Amino acid sequence: MQTAVAETAEDISKIAFGFMASKSLFAALHVDLFSHLSCAAKTERELADAADVPINRITTLSTAMRSLGLMTRENGKLANSPAAEAFLVKGAKYDFGDYLRYQINGQMYPVMGQLNASMDGTLDPDDIASYATWMSDPVQARIYSKAQHAGSLGPGGTIARLGDLSDAKTLLDGGGGTGAMTISLCKANPDLNATIIDFPNVSEIGWEYISDAGLVDRVSYIPANALECQWPTGRCAVLMSYLFSGVPESSLAGLLSDAFNTLRPGGILMVHDFMVNEDAEPPLAALWHVQHMAFTPEASSMTAARIMADMEAAGFENPAEAEVIADMTRIVYARKPG
């Protein structure tokens, strides 16, 4: 369904003031309000005491959370909404609060301040101009990578269910970060061995997750920029997740060529990323493309149709697509002939 066209000043205000909602959510996560409410519903005073925050601030922030549908208030007590309980409570099975705390609020939000300079070509030399620049800082690489890992475990499980790798023995995960996707695919396919390519600082952190997952005998790293290094050959499958949207548009053809040369005949290529359709839907995918452009000015929005066409131009056949994260990401598959 296409997004409704803005017709009133109120429609524009909802867009312009949207940052207030996201920053309010991040503040609630910062003082861990949702975890405090998970044990039991609380009055504002009880929540203030639990969070060690003055009650006027708790009252104001919890009112905002109620207005956004993240909290409820009955019989004088605050409680989490179902979504907040499932996804924003520390330790919950599907908790991605750290992803929002550290990557979205801590890193991505500030980087959006570069968007104007990215648009008019006036980025300062000290600004972040690419993932390579960003991940060269060990501290920033660790913050980004740990948050990205938390946010990728769910999609990794979905990709493992969608992708048929039952006959695959080897996987190359290009730009695979800390290995969240690889871990999910290896757990779902016991005979699969994988190689991950990512920046040295990211690879070092990723190895910790690979070790924790008990996969040190099945997963290896190539600590390098996936756009610049030599890719190994003879692989049964190649995955590129969140790579296309974060690199210059001019790099895509080269990545598809690398994937084609890496695969053995009949091998499968999987590209997972933010993708829009011809009607600029879904909005979150379109906005993530803008986010990436803030620090990679040559990046571009993309459609699944365009990726499938580019795959065919690179020599792949029978491309198909499926949704991974509802209203946000899709995966496109294709095979090397043979």
Image (tube, rainbow, N blue to C red):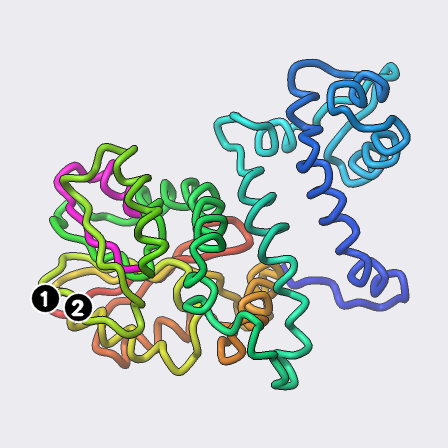
Q: Is 280 positioned to the left or the right of 25 in the image?
A: left
Q: Which residue is labeled 1 in the image? A: 265
Which image quarter is the N terminus in? bottom right
Residue 60's disc number: none
Up-down: is 138 above or below 132?
above
Up-down: is 255 above or below 122?
above
Give the amino acid type for the residue marked by disc 2 in the picture: Lys
Residue 81 appears in the picture as rendered: no
Q: Which residue is labeled 2 in the image? A: 336
Label 1's element? Answer: strand
Give the amino acid type for the residue marked by disc 1 in the picture: Pro
* Image position, residue 109 (x, y; %): 64, 57
Whole-angstrom CA distance, mark 2 to mark 1, is 6 Å
Which image quarter is the C terminus in? bottom left
- Range of the magenta residues? 182-198
Q: Earlier in the sequence, mark 2 or mark 1?
A: 1
Q: Residue at (31%, 44%) from the top-left corner?
A: 160
Label 2's element? Answer: loop
In terms of image quadrants, where is residue 4?
Answer: bottom right
* Image position, residue 126 (x, y; %): 57, 73
In terms of image quadrants, where is residue 53?
Answer: top right
* Image position, residue 81 (x, y; %): 70, 28
Residue 297 appears in the picture as rendered: yes
Q: Residue at (80%, 63%) from the top-left corner?
A: 16
Up-down: is 234 above or below 84?
below
Q: Is 298 positioned to the left or the right of 186 in the image?
A: right
- Determine if the magenta segment contains residue 122: no
* Image position, residue 56 (x, y; %): 90, 31
